Amino acid sequence: MTNNEDKTMTVKIFDTPEVQDFLNIVAGFDQAGGSQRAKQIMHRLLSDLYKLIDDFDVTEEEYWSTVSLLNALGHDTQFGLLSPGLGFDHYLDMRQDAIDAEAKRTGGTPRTIEGPLYVAGAPEAEGFARMDDGSDPEAEVMWLTGQVRDVDGTPIAGAKVEIWHCNSKGNYSFFDPTQSEYNMRRSIYADGEGRYTARSIIPSGYGVPEGAPTDVVLKALGRHGERPAHIHYFVSAPEHQHLTTQINLAGDPYTFDDFAFATREELVVPAKRIEDPAEIAKRELDGPFAEVVFDIDLTRTDAAELQHRHKRPRAKETEAQESQLAGSAKV
Ligand code: DHB
Ligand code: FE
């Protein structure tokens, strides 16, 4: 260690009046305009970061290489990808779980993260939809079905089940421009018994692109950027709480090692291979397939704002420029 480094190690300025007064000015506390909440949050954020710089003796080199990494993340619209990797999405879920528990809205299928790759406006169908466009013939056919019910077991006829998932290479339509529009994205209204059925293909796992800024952050932590094979859901019905969830297919090496922390025990579902010719014929398929069954229980609520998904920038849903959407194309 050089003398110079020795010296900086002993410098602690965060608690001095100069720094504290400076933080108040930077956060705009002495200005009439702006938003009080923005000022308070920025003050807290900057205070925590200034203190961190002091406590860890962050060097100029470390500081500016971090600025550069943030620029790269923004340039590649990757904050939406990094967010689940750093646990923010799961942390927000933990908070919503606690809010539901306090309000006694319990007993339903657990929520888990939306992820950054939803696209609004998928084709709608009643009871059944074929989700894939048939262009992935090597992929195993998936027969995905289940029943939507109230927590007391009553089927919810007409519940809206939105499903999206990636192809056998881990790519999502829209973000992967080589796929047809809305490939493996559908909204299915449950039938009179609350049942929905989709014919699709078994998705593969998903990995953060090698060398991408998100990957750089994860590698610095000694972590990988892999997700198990999974299928996303939005489920909604009048008088019930909107549910954002996913299933993770059992047996994937990453089922319990998901970089996005979305796996929950109750959401791990097996894909059962079915070879019985009668079952194949019943579904008008050409050969063996994998059946995935996922029943969904929704909690009841009268609160209108809980019956819809929360607002966030989403592809084809928001006025935000598509180039600014989380993960657009660079995933
Ligand atoms: C990410 C990708 C996903 O498909 C998903 O469901 C969640 C997160 C990501 O790249 O961060
Ligand atoms: Fe996903």
Image (cartoon, grey):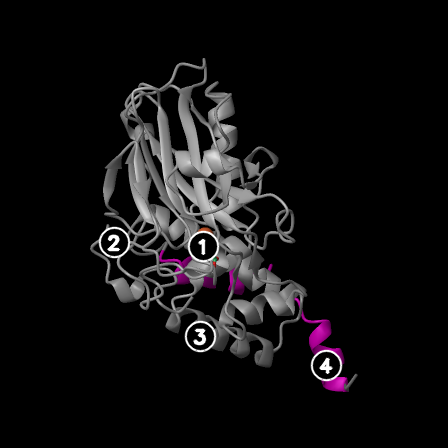
Q: Is residue 27 above or below residue 291?
A: below
List the residue tagged with mark 2.
33
> CB of residue at label 2: within 8 Å of ligand 1?
no
Q: Secondary structure at mark 3?
A: helix
Magenta residues span 3-28
Q: CA distance from mark 3 to mark 4?
A: 29 Å
The answer to which of marks 2 and 3 sits earlier in the sequence is: 2
**Observer-nearest of 9 and 240:** 240
Name the residue beneath numbered marker 4: 5
Q: Amino acid at mark 2?
A: Gly
Q: Is residue 8 magenta?
A: yes
Label 4 Cα neighbours within 10 Å, binned few <14 / some 14-19 / many ≥20: few
**Alpha-carbon distance for marks 3 and 1?**
25 Å
- Pointer 3 residue: 72
- Mark 3 vs mark 4: which is more N-terminal? 4
Give the residue displayed 58% in from the left and 81% down from the top: 61
Q: Position of residue 72 (x, y in %)?
A: 44, 75
Residue that mark 1 sits on: 43
Q: Quadrant of the N terminus?
A: bottom right
**Residue drawn 46% across and 70% down?**
70
Say whether residue 14 is left or right of residue 183. Answer: right
Q: Which of labels 2 and 3 is toward the front?
A: 3
Can you name the residue that lies furthest to the front here? 277
Q: What is the CA distance from the residue labelled 4 to the residue labelled 1? A: 29 Å
Of helix, strand and loop, which one carries label 2?
loop
